[in-house]
Image (cartoon, rainbow, N blue to C red):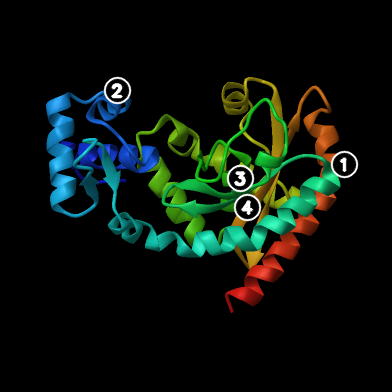
Amino acid sequence: MPSFEPVTAVVRALTVLRIVNELDFASIKQIHKESKLHRSTVLRMLETLMHEGYVTRDAESGMYMPTGKTLLLSRGFDGNRHLSKLAAPVMLALRERIGWPSDLAVLDGDEMLIIETSREYNVMEINHKAGVRAPVLLTSLGRAYLAYCSDAKQNHLLKMLAASHRTTSSPARDNPKGMQKLLNDIRKQGYATPDPKFNQSSGAGLVTGFSVPVFKNNEVFASLSTSFLMSAMSLEEGIASLLPALKETAEKLGEMIGEDYS
């Protein structure tokens, strides 16, 4: 948890940079609309980003574009991109086997970051792409990871989450004993399910699923989930029919990651 309040100017500059990067070719009007920032503020942020070399302005059209320097900001995610490419064919094979999509996520700070998904190959009422972040305590991806952490790492993460003011971290603050029991139960049963209330709100009551841990050299490295329509089968039916395939895929991913990162 940060020790200080965020610096407003930095937040604004990052917001503008993100929008320019997403649009590739952006006008002040578009950035103003997307960011809800005053146009004069947008212009100041753009001028700053241009000075630092992250944004350039096309003289003829007046549009703003990201420069190659923005790639420096993503160097820390090279490992995740590599892992995504490694996992993609395995997850596609899983989708073809069970008929439902899956997500692979790693811990990133105090949230889970989905680095690969097979959802783009599947028609679902609820879809998302890689890059989506998921709360640790309320999603099956986060719970599967946290339950299989070493005691020291688990305690550290729970303390960090308990100190957070986010509503998604409230179980660690309000009911630490209940949270610990839940994590112990997950380790016993071998899979994690999402918080029912969170699943209802995030999935509109249409989709459910569960997750299993992915190990690298006997240490939890990521978590793998599958999701399915509740109209097709209940959570209990899904676990009974899909858990073996999900565990086999997680084991295969773990072996590939262990060999590739050794």
Relative vertical location of residue 240 with respect to residue 91 in this rendering, above or below: above
CB under 8 Å between callouts 4 and 3? yes
The front one of 58 and 41 is: 58
What amino acid is labelled 2 in the image? Lys
Q: Between tags 3 and 2, which lies in front? A: 2
Q: CA distance from mark 1 to mark 4?
A: 19 Å
What amino acid is labelled 3 in the image? Leu
Q: CA distance from mark 1 to mark 2?
A: 47 Å
The location of residue 203, given as percent across then percent down, is 62, 25
Q: Which mark is residue 141?
A: 3
Element under label 1? helix
How many labels sit on residues?
Answer: 4
**Residue identified by numbered label 4:** 223
Relative vertical location of residue 136 with respect to residue 71 in this rendering, above or below: above
**Residue identified by numbered label 1:** 241
The front one of 241 and 65 is: 65
Q: Earlier in the sequence, mark 1 or mark 3?
A: 3
CB under 8 Å between callouts 1 and 2? no
Q: Is residue 238 left or right of residue 216?
A: right
Q: Residues within 10 Å of mark 2 (few under 14, many from 20)?
A: few
| Residue depicted at x 12% and y 27% | 40
